[in-house]
Amino acid sequence: MIAAFISFPINASAQAPATQIQLIEKNVEGFIAAQKDMSAVEEKIQGAVFLNQDNAKYKGTREVVAKKYGFKNYAEYEAVANNISLVVTAIDPQTKEYSDPQAAIKKEIEDVKTDRTIPNGEKKQLLAELNEALKSAPAVQFPANIELVKKYYDKIDVTTISATEGEDSPNSRVVRTISE
């Protein structure tokens, strides 16, 4: 269980969306419907970046796909994707229960502190890593988002979506998408 928390990215921007939004069913349904098309476009962007080719036309296609599925633009689609990802990553796939990352990390810190089987040097390192993870662990600002994402959870399947930070710097995050 300790390894699960240690593997959390330390960079807060990698975990929490820049702006959390209140999701509505239309957002989640649009995200699920758009995912197959959006993933294909994102793969083309990744390929263009890898081959040092211009990916501007694919970025334009991304806008078209977002609008096709009811989003104002790609930025709105991405905000929805980020907020869904924030919730999904804290849902246990077996029980389908949401586990607040901050509460889970705090519990793990207490468990490590009281575990006499962990050597002191290792314990100190684990505690430092867990405390760093705690600092960057996102809190869901809109609790209704949790229930909404849980409602659609069974229609969702793990996939990696790529987004770009800046012009050519790919940044991947795990989200859930439709499986039919």
Image (cartoon, rainbow, N blue to C red):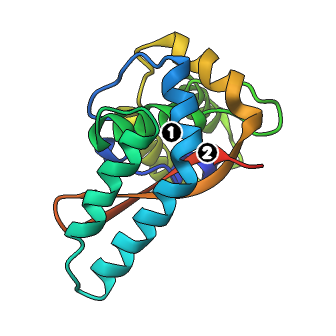
On screen, residue 91 versus residue 50, left or right, reads: right
Where residue 144 sits: x, y (%)? 54, 11
* Snapshot quadrant of residue 73: top left
On screen, residue 95 versus residue 74, left or right, reads: right
Label 2 or label 1, whichever comes before in sequence order? 1
The single residue placed furthest to the bottom in the displayed view is 51
The residue at the point 42 percent across, 64 percent down is: 41
| Secondary element at image label 2 | strand
Tell me the kind of residue under disc 1. Ser
- 23 above or below 16? above
Image disc number at residue 176: 2
| Secondary element at image label 1 | helix
Where residue 29 sits: x, y (%)? 58, 30
The residue at the point 70 percent across, 21 percent down is: 151
Please rate how many residues cluster around mark 2, counting C-alpha atoms within 10 Å: few if below 14, some from 14 to 19, many from 20. many
On screen, residue 145 versus residue 128, left or right, reads: right
Where residue 80 sits: x, y (%)? 42, 33
Where residue 11 sits: x, y (%)? 31, 48
Q: Are marks 2 and 1 in contact (CB under 8 Å)?
A: yes
The residue at the point 23 percent across, 86 percent down is: 52
Image disc number at residue 69: none
The residue at the point 57 percent across, 55 percent down is: 36
- 33 above or below 98? below
Q: Which residue is mark 1?
A: 85
Tell me the kind of residue under disc 2. Arg
* Snapshot quadrant of residue 46: bottom left
* Snapshot quadrant of residue 142: top left
Is residue 133 visible in this depiction of the protein? no
Q: Nearer the viewer, residue 73 or 160?
A: 73
Please rate how many residues cluster around mark 1, counting C-alpha atoms within 10 Å: few if below 14, some from 14 to 19, many from 20. many
How many numbered marks are there?
Answer: 2
